[in-house]
Image (cartoon, grey):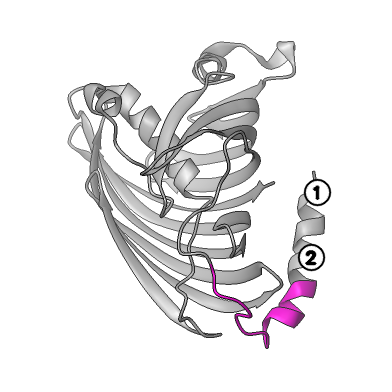
Amino acid sequence: MMKLSKYIGLTIVLGLFFTNVSLGQKPTDKIKLTKGQKIMMTTEMKSDIDQAKRGKMKTDMEMLSELEVIEVTDKGYKLGATMKKAKMKFEGFGMQQEYDSEDKEKQKGMMASAFEKQLNKTKDVEIDFQGKAIDTDDDKSKGGMMARMGGDVKTAVEGIFLLIPDNVEVGGKWRTTTKNDGLKIITEYTYKGMMGNMANVTANQQTKGTVAGGQGGSFTTNVNQLTQMTLMLDASTGVISMKTIETKDDSSTEMGGETYKSYGITNMTITAE
């Protein structure tokens, strides 16, 4: 598996070609996967958040997941998503915690308990041919924490697929708007060019809205985030091979009659092969 530094170098080199190369062939109008296909996803995330009255929180996480195509249906695909490995360091609230799925000395405490419920547990996800998750009857029967966990998996799976409009030119833009659990997400994509089957796309995203959390909605968070992304994807299949994400957060949480403002930046790199 290629290291992050190699991907960065590759991105810079390809950028010289992408600038003036137009879309040489018609991109696929639907996600193309095959039964039995496996996609290995590596996620690296670093966040530094400063929350008023609570102090700074730092998170450093690495995760390896496997996505397997279980079945091709008339609606899309049935996938199995499995977390294979995970590492995480957290500093905040006056404490430090660390977890490593490959180090028994770092598999204790609340963080370990949370990861162990996810590790090597396959979650079924169905997507349509546009790469969007399909709600099943089983999803609708779940509530509370289970529903949120399932939603996180669906969001991660959706995040490695993207279709490029077939009439887009270099420098051309297109926009999507989604609403989910109180959040409105507006994303504007810019097509930068192509070499072979690989396309280069950048995106700006705004996320706003209010979500409830805790038992009985004991707190609410007013979300206000701006995100910049750079993507490399196979335009013939719609599968993203690399995505870098920087999110600037300016949100606030209402809890117990108090308001906690939070500011910070989260950087994430996702690779798939």
Q: Is residue 128 visible?
A: yes
Q: Decide: marks 1, 2 in contact (CB < 8 A)?
A: yes
Q: Where on the picture, by quarter, is residue 45?
A: top right
- Quadrant position of the N terminus in the picture: top right
* Image position of 82 with respect to 153: above or below: above
**Residue 8 on image: x %, y %:** 75, 62
Q: Secondary structure at mark 1?
A: loop
The amino acid beneath tag 2 is Leu
Say few, some or many: other residues with alpha carbon within 10 Å of mark 1 (under 14 / 14 to 19 / 20 or more): few
The amino acid beneath tag 1 is Met
Q: Residue at x 74, y 16 (%)?
A: 103
Judge by depth and name the residue closer to the eye, 181 or 153.
153
Q: Residue at x 65, y 76 (%)?
A: 194
Q: Residue at x 75, y 73 (%)?
A: 14
Q: Give the mark nearer the N terminus: 1 vs 2.
A: 1
Q: Secondary structure at mark 2?
A: helix
Which residue is identified by label 1?
2
* Image position of 78 with respect to 174: above or below: above
**Residue 256 on image: x %, y %:** 20, 31
Which residue is identified by label 2?
10
Alpha carbon separation for disc pair 1 and 2: 10 Å
Whether the magenta-drawn stretch holds residue 14 is answered as yes
**Magenta residue span:** 13-27
